[in-house]
Amino acid sequence: MWKNIASTFLTLAVVLLIAVAALVAWGKTQYTGPGPAQVAQCVQVARGASLSAVSKTLAEQGAISNAYIFRTGADAAGKSRDLKFGSYLVPPQSSMEDIVGVITAGGPSTCGTEVIYRVGVRADSVVLRDINPETGAYEERVKYDPATEQVPEAIAKAEEQADARLRVAIAEGVTSWQVVEGLKRADFLSGDVGSVPAEGTLAPDSYEVAKGADRAALLAEMEQRQSAILQTAWDARPFGLPYENPEQALIMASIVEKETGIPDERATVASVFVNRLEQGMRLETDPTVIYGVTEGRGVLDRGLRRSELSRRTDWNTYQIDGLPKTPIANPGRAAIEAALNPAETDYVFFVADGTGGHQFSRTLEEHNAAVARWREIEAQQGSGG
């Protein structure tokens, strides 16, 4: 009898082991295999969220098929305590394993709702946008001008959402005064700014911030980034450039930034000004004159007057030799790199060509002909031709 009992028990144990093995294999397949979502999913992890809460949310939105398997797999991989706050876009049919990898790796958020305060050269704007999971592209929902308009209700509500991202975006070519004025109007920031940072020392970039972030601390981060960008470019510069120090390179970069918005032209524009410096010519560039008029406090919405071109200031490169006293804006990384890696040309002149770009010339005769063509284009545009 005991033999029969032992045999039966052994059989049941074997069957049970086989069943457990099959269940484990099935669970592993569920964990590593394609997920149920047929479109991209925006997976959000709240600050301090537990794996249990996240797995429940994922199951409810159809990103995973089984919350228990998701938690078990994450625990087995040793990642159950590694959740990183943020919003992450995951592709269609992403496996549970893939999703665990995304939400525990962290990094910049790639989806969800975000409010962006954009400090621009001509105007600031605040934009509410969120991602369309089907296309993976951000779509603008609401936009307003903080200098002239009231905060739309949708943006005010979004700023209060715990999972919404707040971002400050600084355009290339803005002045430090414009940045400070913009940050003062950003009502989701806090704290006093103090003095305006030195011109050119703020890095145009996108900065993710928390609600209530300190304005002065944000400006300090901008200065740190710009300093690092400039130092890296300075250390990698070729031999023989006409700059005595990184600050002079930054001044040149700001001029390049204001002279062209065409990425492919930056290095050529830089070469023109470098060639002029090396030949003892004056830079004679309008943006420096404009800065002498405005000192970076706003935009000059008119043409330069003859009296302004002839008035000597520390920035009027028609009247002074060499570089102006300070940068005339905050140049971006590309302009800094162009100033420190100018193209090898023998150009010393350039003028607008009517396409948004410039015509570059080696001689005054070539330049005068290019200017005449530009005048014709201006006349045709003025007459509607």
Image: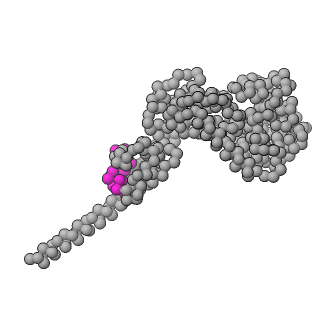
Q: Which residues are magenta?
A: 58-73
Badge count:
0
- The x and y percentages for residue 319 are 86, 30
Colour convention:
one colour
Give residue 299's quadrant in the image: top right
Location of residue 348 with respect to 123 vertically, above or below: below
Question: Which SS does the magenta portion mostly show?
Answer: helix
Give residue 281's quadrant in the image: top right
- The x and y percentages for residue 225 are 64, 43
- The x and y percentages for residue 113 are 47, 37
Residue 68, magenta (yes or no): yes
Location of residue 253 with respect to 11 vertically, above or below: above
| Lateral position of residue 257 relative to residue 127, left or right | right
Location of residue 230 with respect to 101 vertically, above or below: above
Query: Residue at the location (51% across, 24% down)?
Result: 151
Query: Farthest left residue?
Result: 1
- Residue 135 in sight: no
- The x and y percentages for residue 316 are 82, 30
- Image quadrant where one finds the N terminus: bottom left
Query: Residue at the location (50% across, 34% down)?
Result: 211
- Residue 330 in sight: yes
| Lateral position of residue 299 relative to residue 376, left or right | left
Query: Residue at the location (75% across, 35% down)?
Result: 327
Closer to us: 115 or 39: 115
- Image quadrant where one finds the C terminus: top right
Closer to us: 324 or 223: 223
Query: Residue at the location (77% across, 25% down)?
Result: 293
